[in-house]
Image (cartoon, rainbow, N blue to C red):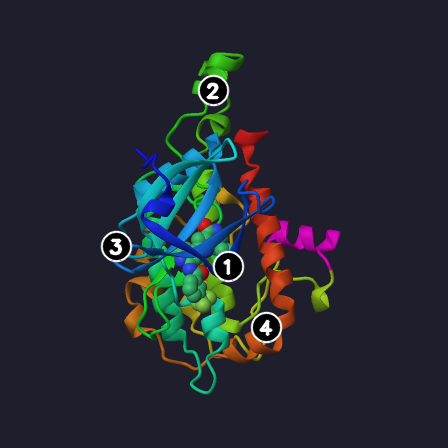
Amino acid sequence: AFHEYPVTQDYRISRKVRVTVAVGVVLGVGINGKVVECENRATQEKYALKVLRDTEKARREVELHVMASGHPHIVSIHDVYKNSYNGVDCLLVVMENMKGGELFARIQERGQKAFTEREAAGIVNEICSAVAHLHRMSIAHRDLKPENLLYCTPAASAALKLTDFGFAKKTDESEPQGLKTACFTPYYCAPEVLGTEKYDKSCDLWSVGVIMYILLCGYPPFYSQHGQPMSPGMKAKIKSGQYTFPSPEWDCVSEAAKDLIRKLLRTEPTERITIEQTMEHKWISHYRKVPDTPLFTSSNLCEQKEQWVDVQDEMEATLASMRVGPENI
Ligand SMILES: O=C(Nc1cc(-c2cc3c([nH]2)[C@]2(CCCNC2)CNC3=O)ccn1)c1cccc(C(F)(F)F)c1
């Protein structure tokens, strides 16, 4: 249930921090939505405010995020308002303010002290515990990418949390409900159409694999040479799952880490490791014992700074193609 009175009654909305989001919002400031900082009038506490146009998709995003909220590695929702601007209904989501910024920005700004394999394992463990929480609730996030992983505060000990449920979906709502009402009874349905559960969840494990790969070396497993736009050959390479562990960055990375990456980046979704199996993998379950080997990550992230936008675009495009799974055809 949302508050129906104006959000401005409880919060002062500043224009200071504008973290843009690709959400369709109509606040008279154009199609591009914004996540802005706001301040609780009673407590002076700062929060992040995400504004969504009140649509079916927005309702699902808010509903699933509220369900997941409360986990130590999911950005928590504080309040939700339904307000109307120039006759357009909007949902306003007040979230805890993640003042530590994005995951890779922090590693890039690392400076002298090298980023180590054990630190990477700790980060992947935090991401996996958030994914495990969602999958246990039959929620697939489906947009797990670096810019949706934020730190609470600038402190080195700050928790890393997952946000943006804009593509999340319940994996236990059987599709046939729609199909039954639409065109035919499900009895004659092929199994892969009925059980899309594993496909949606497997997107998240592929994302964990890509993020883990980048954490260990500073560049993505699949990328076009020298930042050229995605070539058809690249698509084939991604489909075929062709990636390597090039020297020198990967020479000092443990076999356990490479073993887990191979299991996460399987191109066949049904062969990909599940989140439960990932949490049991010794690189995660014993992350505190992972070798504290210094990595090339921070220096590579800095050197390839200008390519970072392309990396994000390629990951976004691949995620979008994975979301058009069998059930969406
Ligand atoms: O991002 C900040 N606070 C924040 C932000 C969000 C947030 C929600 C969403 C996003 N951010 C993004 C922005 C574009 C990239 N994807 C994620 C799109 N979708 C969302 O749902 C949630 C909570 N606190 C922040 C606040 C103060 C300072 C700083 C910084 F560290 F940058 F100075 C960041």
Task: Name which residue type carries label 2.
Answer: Gly
Above or below for 69 versus 106: above
Q: Position of residue 141 (x, y in %)?
A: 43, 45
**Residue toward you, 327 or 310:** 310
Residue 221 in view here: yes
Residue 42's mark? Answer: 3
Q: Nearer the viewer, mark 3 or mark 1?
A: 3
**Residue toward you, 136 or 12:** 12
Answer whether labels 4 and 3 touch (C-beta < 8 Å): no
Please report whichever mark, 4 or 1, sits nearer to the chain's N-terminal start: 1
The span from disc 2 to disc 3 (Cα, nearest Å) is 45 Å
- Residue highlighted by disc 1: 18
Task: Name which residue type carries label 1.
Answer: Arg
Answer whether labels 4 and 2 touch (C-beta < 8 Å): no
Q: Which residues are magenta?
A: 229-241
Q: Residue at x 52, y 72 (%)?
A: 217
The span from disc 4 to disc 3 (Cα, nearest Å) is 54 Å
The span from disc 4 to disc 2 (Cα, nearest Å) is 47 Å
**Label 4: which secondary element:** loop
